Structure formats: structure tokens, C-alpha cells
Amino acid sequence: MKVLFVSAEVAPYSKAGGLADVAGSLPQAMASYAETIQVLTPLYGQIDVAQYHIKPTDVKGEILLGDEVIPYRIHQTSDPNSAVQIKFVSCDRFFQRNGIYTESNGEGFTDNNLRYFFFQLVALDLILSGKLQADLLHCNDHHTGLLPALILAHHLNVKTVFTIHNFLYHGHFSKAEAALLPKSILPYLSTTQWDNYSALLEGIDHSRIVTTVSPGYARELLEGVDIDSESHARIVAARGKFTGIVNGIDTNYWSPGIDPLIPHHFSSNDLHGKEQNKLALLSKTGLDPDLQAPLFGSISRLVENKGFPLIVELLDDFVELGAKFIFLGSGSPEIANQLRKASEKHPRHIAFDDRFNEPLAHLIEAGSDMFLMPSRFEPCGLNQLYSLRYGTIPVVNRTGGLGDTVEDWSQNSGTGFVFSPYDIKELRKAMIRAIKVYHLKPDWFNLMRRAMLKDFSWDQSAKQYFMLYTS
Ligand code: GLC
């Protein structure tokens, strides 16, 4: 079986969110199951081609978009540690920019739809021309949602899997934009109630199998939680090919015993390093070097659905509860402003950093006592999985993948603190419970060990994907 995995982001090359982590690690985990597995992604201007030894190949072509002919060239890495081949689509006009989806001020590029039309048409062209062989195309999110219909329109014998990482983003495009696509795809597309098209829904309609990134989120989508009735109807129509597989994590990269990005290593048998990391984290972020006070960490894009109305309302409570809070993430300027103000008001208790950096993310996972992730909804969520592995106890809303991967604490079981329904009262109660257990040392250490021993490697999930691929 020759698999082509197509994604708009692939870590470590380009990353805007969790999609990149999955695209960076799932194909690696699938490598032993497939004859070949290749990953196709755009070569954005910000990708460090020297660092990753990305070189141009002889494979090139031209894409007709509307009446414009736009050339592309395939680049490739030759990373000896990688079991999969990563191929990059280079095109100055669409990808030679610094951002992945947005300008530096956070505004989306106005031609995003065209950029991903082009990207998908390159994938199709590679297959059609035989420059790349694929029996199965694994598409991810709306940026690749038109590929299943393109495959059908060209009567290609290529099976398609479409994975939804987040139903919030549809990739809506107008009829005028659709007119730039190959004519043969148009009969396959269905307009939405806004008289435009949704690349996400097209992916669901036309792929052979639809997956989402946890069984819990699959259930919520099928039940229609928080989605409009039209989208829901299209999901329900896909019910028979719809399934949820929880994401795994790259356990070499996220591993407290060997992580090169943290100053002190530790394991479930020897937790000394964890306390030293906490001290390092407190001093790095300018908080009181007080090891007794519980330290909450959080890493997230600043968007409403990650639980911000609740987090913002809670900020003064950290001080009152004798806890500390470190937040890393960027996004909405308003939310950033509120976090910054709180950190200025309580400089010894709250720290906020909006300059994303990977070493700080690892130190937050390693040095915090608890990880705050009260998302309103969460398709899977990866940070709670990294947290569990680093003995950093997640405090989460019971939704989607969070509900599937974190089990509520009781004396002898559980790996975190789970609240429901999504409101400030319940979140505050969960935090107070967490703080109480934190001060009961034997219980807390047992909880940390249980969390660290959970297996969220890709092994199980890769097997499930393989079963789907073969089916
Ligand atoms: C999206 C989802 C997140 C998921 C990730 C990877 O970022 O919001 O929940 O873990 O994709 O699938």
C-alpha cells in the first residue's frame, strides 16, 4: 500500500497548531504498515531549508487555476532519521511568505482559498502524471477537503481518508472562486445555506472514510453538538464511514527522561528533577521561587474556544487560592491584553509570554504541577497528553478528546481533574479539588505516577488507522 499523507502543516517544519504535530508523527508511526508513506506539504517561506536539508528535486509541473498557469516544483528532505519521505510544494507566488495562514498582524491572507486550491491541484497533478504513486490519500482538514472530490472527478483508483482535526474551520469559498477549479469537480460540490462552499464538508461528503481525532469528538459531531443543522445533516449522511481515533504523541520528543529542552530529567520512579524544573520555570518567568505553592501552566492559542472567557474570569482567583499561573500563547490581541494586565497586577503570581518558544513550552510541561485546559470543545488536544507524560496533572472540561484521555481523580484512580458542565463554577471547583489533593503528598505523588504511566504513544492508534486503510 502506497500512502500519501497531505497536510497544510507538518512539524517540525511548519506549525500553527496540533495538526502539525499529528502530521509530523502519525505518518512516522504508520511507516512500518505501508509500503511507502510520503507526506506532502507546502514549502512556506519561513521553513528553514538549510536546517532541514530541504533540496529541490527534478519534479516540477504547472497548474491551471482559472486561466492562469502557475508553476510548482517539489522539494524534499533527506533526513536519515525519518522513515517517511517529506515532500514540499514550492511556489513563490503562494507560499514564499512568512506566515502559514496569516500576515504578521494576525489577519488571514486574502488568497488562502486559492493557495490551498493550488496545493491540492499539485497533489492531483503528481498522481495523475505518475510522478508520485499513491493507492491511498490521507487528507487532513479543509485545506485538503477538495481532494476526495477531485479524485472522484478524475475517476482515479485512489482511496481517500479524510481526517477532521477541528470542525470549526470550514474553508468556505465563493462560487467565483469555485469557478477557478477544474470544471469536472463542480458537479460534485454542494452549496451551503450561505450560497458558498465548505471545503470541510466536501471532504466529508466524498472521502471513502472520515475520521476525527477522538471517539468523544466523533460522538459530539454525530450528535450535532454546537454545529448548524445543515452541517450536521451532512455528517449524519456520512455516519456509516465515520469514526474517531484518538491522537497519539511523539514519545521520543515528549519524554521527561531524555528531553533535551528541559534542564532536569525525571521519571515516574525518580521525580526529583520535576521539582528542579519547577524552580527553573519560576525563576525564568520571574515568579516567586516558592516550591510549596501549586503552579498551573497553560499553553494555547488565544482563541475563545480554548476556554478563555473562563480563564480570564479566574485570573484573580489564582492569588486568592495561593496558586501561581504561567501562560504561554498568542492569538487574540484582546485576550493577550487581559492576560498581560493580570500579570502586571500580580507579577509574583501570574506570568504571561506570547512569544512562542519550544523550550519554554517543554519547561512548562515539565515544571508545572497542573495543566489548565478548560476548552469549550476539544477535538483531541495534545497538551493534556504531553502533560500526563510529564506528571503535570490536567484540569480539563469533559469534552471531545479531553474526556477520552483524562480520567477524573479519586483516591486510587484517575489521572486529572475533569469538570462538567462548562462553566466558571465547575472549573473553580475542579481547581480547588486539585489544589487540595496537591497538598496531600502521598495522594499527589500517586496521581503523578499514574498519569506518567499512561501510554499515549501512537502504537494503538496507528494500528487502528492501518485497519481503516486496509478496510
Ligand atoms: C486541532 C484540534 C486539537 C487536535 C489537533 C490535532 O488543533 O483543535 O484538538 O488535537 O487538531 O488533531
Image (tube, rainbow, N blue to C red):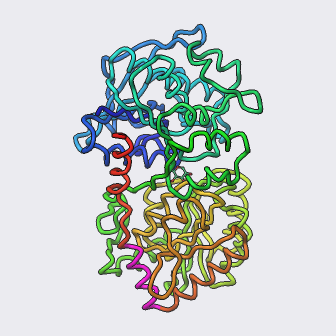
- Region of the chain picked out in magenta, as a range: 441-452
Q: Which of 175 and 110 is in front in this view?
A: 175
> Where, by quadrant of the figure, is residue 378 drawn?
bottom right
Residue 9: % across, % down = 47, 39
Q: Could one spot residue 398 in this view of the protein? A: yes
Furthest-front residue in this view: 240
Q: Is residue 403 left or right of residue 260?
A: right
Q: Nearer the viewer, residue 347 or 222?
A: 222
Furthest-top residue in this view: 67
Q: In which quarter of the image is the C terminus?
A: top left
> Where, by quadrant of the figure, is residue 193 drawn?
top right
Residue 258: % across, % down = 29, 64
| Residue 451 versus residue 150 in the image, above or below | below
| Residue 318 versus residue 219 in the image, above or below | below
Residue 16: % across, % down = 53, 45
| Residue 272 versus residue 36 in the image, above or below | below
Query: Residue at position x 44%, y 86% from top?
Result: 412
Q: In which quarter of the image is the N terminus?
A: top left
Q: Could one spot residue 282 in this view of the protein? A: no
Examine the structure image and report whether residue 445 is included in the region drawn in magenta: yes
Q: Which of 11 and 26 is in front in this view?
A: 26
Look at the magenta stretch and give its main secondary structure.
Answer: helix
Query: Residue at position x 62%, y 78% from top?
Result: 430
Residue 187: % across, % down = 62, 18
> Where, by quadrant of the figure, is residue 358 drawn?
bottom left
Q: In this view, does 435 lie to the left or right of 384?
A: right
Examine the structure image and report whether residue 294 is included in the region drawn in magenta: no
Q: Is residue 336 left or right of residue 436?
A: right
| Residue 74 versus residue 298 in the image, above or below | above
